[in-house]
Every structure is written in structure tokens, then in C-alpha cells.
Image (spheres, grey):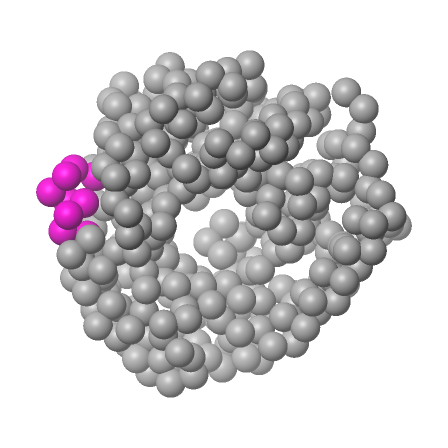
Amino acid sequence: MRKRRLGIRKRWALGIFAELHDAKVREHRLDTLFWECTLRCNLACRHCGSDCRVDPGVADMPLADFLKVLDEEITPHVDPAEVLIIFSGGEVLVREDLEEAGREVTRRGYPWGMVTNGMALTEKRFRSLLDAGLRSISVSLDGFEPEHNYIRGNPLSYDRALRAIRMIVREPTLSYDVVTCVTGALIPQLEPFREMLIAEGVEHWRLFSIFPMGRAKEDPTLRLSDAQFRELLEFIRRTRREGRIDASYACEGFLGGYEAEVRDHFYECAAGVSVASVRVDGAISGCTSIRANFNQGNIYRDRFWEVWEQRFEPFRNREWARRGECADCRMFRYCLGGGMHLHDDDGSLLYCHYKRL
């Protein structure tokens, strides 16, 4: 398969997009806030970046602590209607007070969403979450039954995830996507899997490949070869052109000639620019996939808004990433060293999407 070239027009457009990103950095207007409300999980997935467990040894953050940050540190500085709060984990449905959390952030004017594996999403629970103001949801489905159950480590996980998806696609007011972790086993089945999703009424499908973090770091068989990675991008490109399902590659890395062909936009890492997270232990960071070495503060000892305004330098000035294989890369202007979650504790790049193409 021949490498897709990055043509002159696309380079020109990428240059303009880079300038727009610089403007976003200067403004750093918060529009998405992740609350990592638990590290407990009802599965033990082979690819889990957080290495979550039934009993992770880390207590859930009390809802009152998160609401205190909202009330005292965030709400005075933002229009709540323009900041999406996403509950993440772990598996958020293990929290019995999730509906209360939803009602409280809704009462404060914030839209909210959640990320789930679908295992515990019954019809009753789904309705109670909608009544609590649920506006968006992401559900994971990683292939047909054998592949999904293998990755998720539970023989019921496929049926439960599909049950959740069938409920979600029937809800016209809900924003959603089905998220698929693509492994080598799924590559030859991508087309029939797509047809199954379309038949189930799925309209929004986000695909990503595994990077070496958490449990996934210990299982190289889950990762795609370079040829398989290119095959995945070609599949997404074809699927988007067909227009029967809104398929996109996740916001993980710069994709060279595939930019704006497998996503609705050019690549950028919004972590620390427009996206922040409050981790389960109170740490303040960009998104929840980023290593703890990049934490910028903690709600239990720092003021969130002061941290947001005055720190986050590693997220907003990426010159530190211009080293190693990035040092003399011609794409650095557009890529800025890739997603923050792709960097190890010492800042070294673990995974370069562009060089795999």
C-alpha cells in the first residue's frame, strides 16, 4: 500500500489550522471537563490504559468534593452551558450516586455525558440517567462477540454492550458514539462489523488503535502492525466517502496525508488547551489518559482556576517535545509531538502515528 502524500493544498490548510490552534492556546477557554469519578470497574479489559479493577485500592472521589470545585472554582469563570462535563472511570455505572451527580451538575446549568462499557446499563438505569439530565454517552464495542469478549475478559460483555447500544440509538435527543478499539483480529472483519453497526441503527462510530499504556503495555499482540494501521485508515476513509455511517479515527495523533480524510478536522491535542480533568485522587490534568507526571496540581491543595490559568505550560508550549525522533521532523509544526497521552513519564514519545504510515 503506497503512502499517502501530504499535498501542497493540505499543507497550506494545516498551516492555517496551526495558527488557529495557537490562538486557542492563548485563549485556553475551557469547554470540556472530565471527572474521573472512580477507578473501580466491573471488567478487567486487556487493553485498559488505567489498569482498572473491581477493587483498585483508590477510593471514589466524593461527589461533594467535585461539586465544591465546580461551585467555587469553575462556575464563576465560565458559562456552564458551554462546558461539557464528562463522567469517566473506571466504569462510571458502579457509582450508585451517578444520577445524583447528574442532577447536581444539570441544576448548575452544565450539560453532562459519560463513558461506559455498557455492562450495567439496564433499561431502568438508562431511563434514570436520562431523567438526571444525561446528554451524551460513549459505549465501547470492540468487534464481534469472540473479539470483544476476549478483550473485555467477560463472556457477557458483548451482549451487554450491544443491549446498551440498542437502547441508546433509539433516543433521539442523545448525542452518542460507539467506540471501537481496533486490534489485528478485527482488521479482516471491519467491513462486516460496519454493516452490523449500520443494521443496528448506529450513526456515529469512533475507532482507535491501542497505544502502550497501562495493561495494554504488557500485551503487544493487541497492537496493529504498520500495514494494519494503514489498512484501518484506508477503511475509515472509504467508509466516510460512502456516507452511510459517520466513522472517524480518534484524536490520537497526526496522520499525514490522511489528515481531514479520516476525521472531520485536522489533528490537534486539546488537552490543557480546552480540555481539563479532575482525577479520582484530585489531580488536575488535561485528559485522563495522560501520565501522572504531567499533573498540574490537585484540588485538595490548589485552586483549580488558578492552576488552569497559570500552569499547563507543558500542554500549551510543546517545544519540550522537539527531541528524539521529533527533533528534526518536518511535521512538528502540525503535530507538536503528538497527543500528550503518547508521552512517557520522562516526556519521551512512545508512539508516532505519522512514522507508521
**Position in image of residue 218 (x %, y %):** 52, 29
- Which residue is situated farthest in the bottom direction here? 76
175 in magenta: no
- Which residue is situated farthest in the left direction here? 124
Residue that appears at 30% across and 50% down: 174
Residue that appears at 11% across and 42% down: 124
Question: Is residue 311 positioned above or below 41 on the image?
Answer: below
Q: Can you see residue 343?
A: no
Q: Main secondary structure of the magenta part?
A: helix
Question: Is residue 89 positioned above or below 157 on the image?
Answer: below
Question: Is residue 329 positioned above or below 283 on the image?
Answer: above
Quarter that holds the C terminus: top right
On the rendered structure, is 264 left or right of 189? right
Quarter that holds the N terminus: top right
**Position in image of residue 72 (x %, y %):** 33, 83
Q: Count how many numbered circles sit on residues in the image.
A: 0
**Which residue occupies the foreground of this view, 204 or 181?**
204
Q: Can you see residue 25?
A: yes
**Which residue occupies the foreground of this view, 349 or 156?**
156
Residue that appears at 32% across and 69% down: 110
**Which residue occupies the foreground of this view, 294 or 69?**
69
Residue that appears at 26% across and 68% down: 105
**Position in image of residue 96 (x %, y %):** 15, 51
Q: Which residues are magenta?
A: 121-129
Which image quadrant for residue 46? Answer: top left
On the rendered structure, is 239 left or right of 355? left
126 in magenta: yes
**Position in image of residue 212 (x %, y %):** 57, 36
